[in-house]
Image: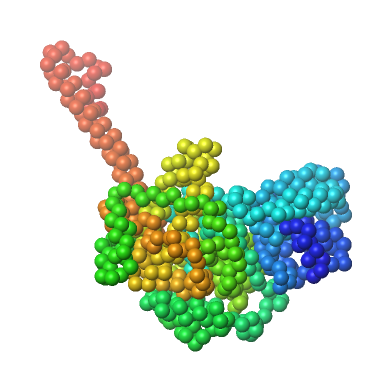
Amino acid sequence: MESQGRDEMKGPVLHIVVVGFHHKKGCQVEFSYPPLMPNEGHDSSLLPEEWKYLPFLALPDGAHNYQDDTVYFHLPPLSVDMKCVYGVSCYRQIEAKALKVRQADVTRETVQKSVCVLSRVPLYGLLQAKLQLITHAYFEEKDFSQISILKELYEHMNGSLRGSALEGSQVYLGLSPRDLILHFQHKVLILFKLILLEKKVLFYVSPVNRLVGALMTVLSLFPGMIEHGLVDSSHYKPKSSVSDDLSLVESGLGAEEFVSVSVTDIAHANMEATQPAAESLLSGNSSQGDSNHLKPPSRTSPESSESDWETLDPSVLEEPKEPAAGSSGSDMPDAFDSKPGTPITVQPLGVGGQGGVIQGLVSGLEEDQYGLPLPVFTKGYLCLPYMALQQHHLLSDVTVRGFVAGATNILFRQQRHLSDAIVEVEEARIQIQDPELRKILSLTTADLRFADYLVKHVTENRDDVFLDGTGWEGGDEWIRAQFTLYLHSLLSSALQQDNERLLADYGVPFIGAWKNTHNFRVWFSNKHPGMTAITPGHPFQGQYSVADVKLRLSHSVQNSERGKKIGNAMITTSRSVVQTGKAVGQSVGGALTSAKSAMSSWFSTLAQPQPLTPSSGPEPASEVKP
C-alpha cells in the first residue's frame, strides 16, 4: 500500500481510529485519520482484510460493565515489509442525554466509543497516557463530530515520538514487576519458564486493563522482549483466509517445527542432538534428523489432574551427586561452596548497559551481544495481549504453534483443552492439566531461593523506598535486572554439556524440554560474544539446608491444591477447637464456680447458728441445679 508507506515515513503512529457500537451493526469504525483504506473518506467503516478484528479489539467484550477501560492489542502487518502493529485503545461510555449533539443513530441510553492509536513502536504506557487525556477531552466536547482534536493528536504523537529510542523507562511505563510479584509471589518464575517453553498460555481476568497489564508485565521480565522481540508476534490470518497446511511448505518451513514436544520424548536429549537441528535452521531446510527429535506425544498423560507440580518432591532435597572428574564443574569450586545459610545477593548491571543491538542472522530480530531477546514470538508463536471472541479460531489454528494471549470472555477459559496453561490473574492461579508439564515447571530449590529472594526484597522494602517502587533494590528495574541475570546464567549453563549439577539447579526436565524449543535452537545456532563473560551456574546455587526444606514446605502448603486443602482444614479445625474450648470452659467452668460458691455458702451457713432467712434459703438449691 503506497499510502501506508507514506504514513510510515511520517512517524511511528500509523492511524488514529474511533470505534463505536451501533445498535444494529455492532462494533464498527466510525473515524480514521489517515483513512484506513486508500481512496476512502475519514468516516468510512471499510477495513483491510488483515485488520477485520480491529473493532472488536478496540471495543472489548463486556465493555458496557465499566465506565472506562484500556486495551493493548496487536494487529498483523499489511505488507511483507511491515512488522507487528501495536494498538492502544481507550474506551469510555457516556449517557446519551448528556450529548449536546445527538445523532439519529443514537437510540440507546448510553454511547460507547473507543479512541485507538495504531503504532509501529511498542510504547504501550506512553501512548496510553497521551491517549487517555485526549479521550477525556473528546468526550467532554459532548459532540463526537468534533474530530479536529483527533487530527491534532496524530500530528502531536508523530512529532513527539519521531526518532525516540526504544530504551529506558519509556518502554516500561505502566508495567510494574513489583506489583506482579506482590500478587503472584513465586509463581512469577513459573510463568517465566512457561513462556520459555513456548506453550499455549492464556491469561484470564476482567477488566481488560488488568489483563493486558499483567500479561505485558510478565513479558517485560525478558530482556529486550518488548523493545525488539514482538515484531513477528502477530503474523496470523483472519478466519476467512486461513490457509491450508500447504502454506507451511510454501514458506519453506517443515511442519515438524510446529509440533508440540512431550517430556517423555526429550527427557534424554543432549546437545549432540540439538546441534544438527540448529544447523538445519541455518541452511533453511529441515533435515531427517530434525524430524526425529521433534515427535508428537507418544503416550497419554495420567488421569490425575491434581496440582502436584507444586507439591513437595523429596528427591530435590537430596544431596546431588558429585560431578565426575574432569567435568566442567571441577573448574568452578567456588560456585558450590557458598554457605546455604547466608543469602546470595546479586547486583547485575541494568538492562540499558548491555550495549547496542544488531540484526540477528537467524532470528531476524535486533539482538544484543548476548543474543537477546530470545526469538520466542516467531514462526507462528503469537503474542496477543487481548483476544476478541471473533479470534477464537486462532487457538486451534494449525499455523499457530503456540501463543501468549489474554481474554475476558469465559468461553476461552471453559475450553481448557485448547491451552496448555490458564492463568487466572484474579486468584493468582496457574492451571495446568498435563502432569508432565507440571513436573517440568516444578521449581527447584535454587529456583525457590531466587523467587523467595525477590519476594522478600519487594515486601520488606515496600515502605522503605521513596515513592514505593522507585528505589533500586526491590524496585521495578532491579527486578528486571534479576531476571536478566537469571536468563544469562540459564543460557550459559545450558551450553555446558557434561555438567548435570549445573543443569539440576534449573531442573533437568525443564532444560531438556527447553533445548528442543524453537527459541533455544535459533539462539544456539549463532555465536554471541557477550556470553563469554557470563559464569555458568544458577545465581542461587549451593548446598541444601534446613532452611531450604522449610522454604519448600512453605511454598507447597501455600500454593498446591493439596496443601491449600490441608491448610484450610487446619484453620477450620483450630478455629472449631478454640470455639468449643471456650464454650466448654464457659459451661463447665461456670458450673464449677456456681457449685463452689454454693458449697462455701452452705458451709458458712452451718458455721453460723442463726436461722435461715426466707430470702437466703432457696439460693443454694437453685444454684446447684443442673
Up/down of 259 relative to 111, above or below: below
Relative placement, left or right, of 338 versus 473 is: left
Asked if residue 255 shows in the view, the reply is: no
Q: 43 and 465: which one is in front?
A: 465
Residue at 44 percent across and 49 percent down: it is: 347
Residue 604, position as x, y percentages in the image? 15, 18
- Give left or right: position of 351 versus 316: right
The x and y percentages for residue 262 are: 44, 76
Vertical order, 212 against 95 (above or below): below
Residue 245 occupies which quadrant of the picture? bottom right
Q: Residue at x 62, y 72 (%)?
A: 394
Foreground: 604 or 456? 456
Residue depicted at 53% across the width and 56% down the height: 354
**Percent x, y for residue 323?**
28, 68
Q: Position of residue 526 (x, y in %)?
A: 51, 72
Between residue 179 and residue 626, name the one nearer to us: 179
Rendered view: 30 above or below 110: below
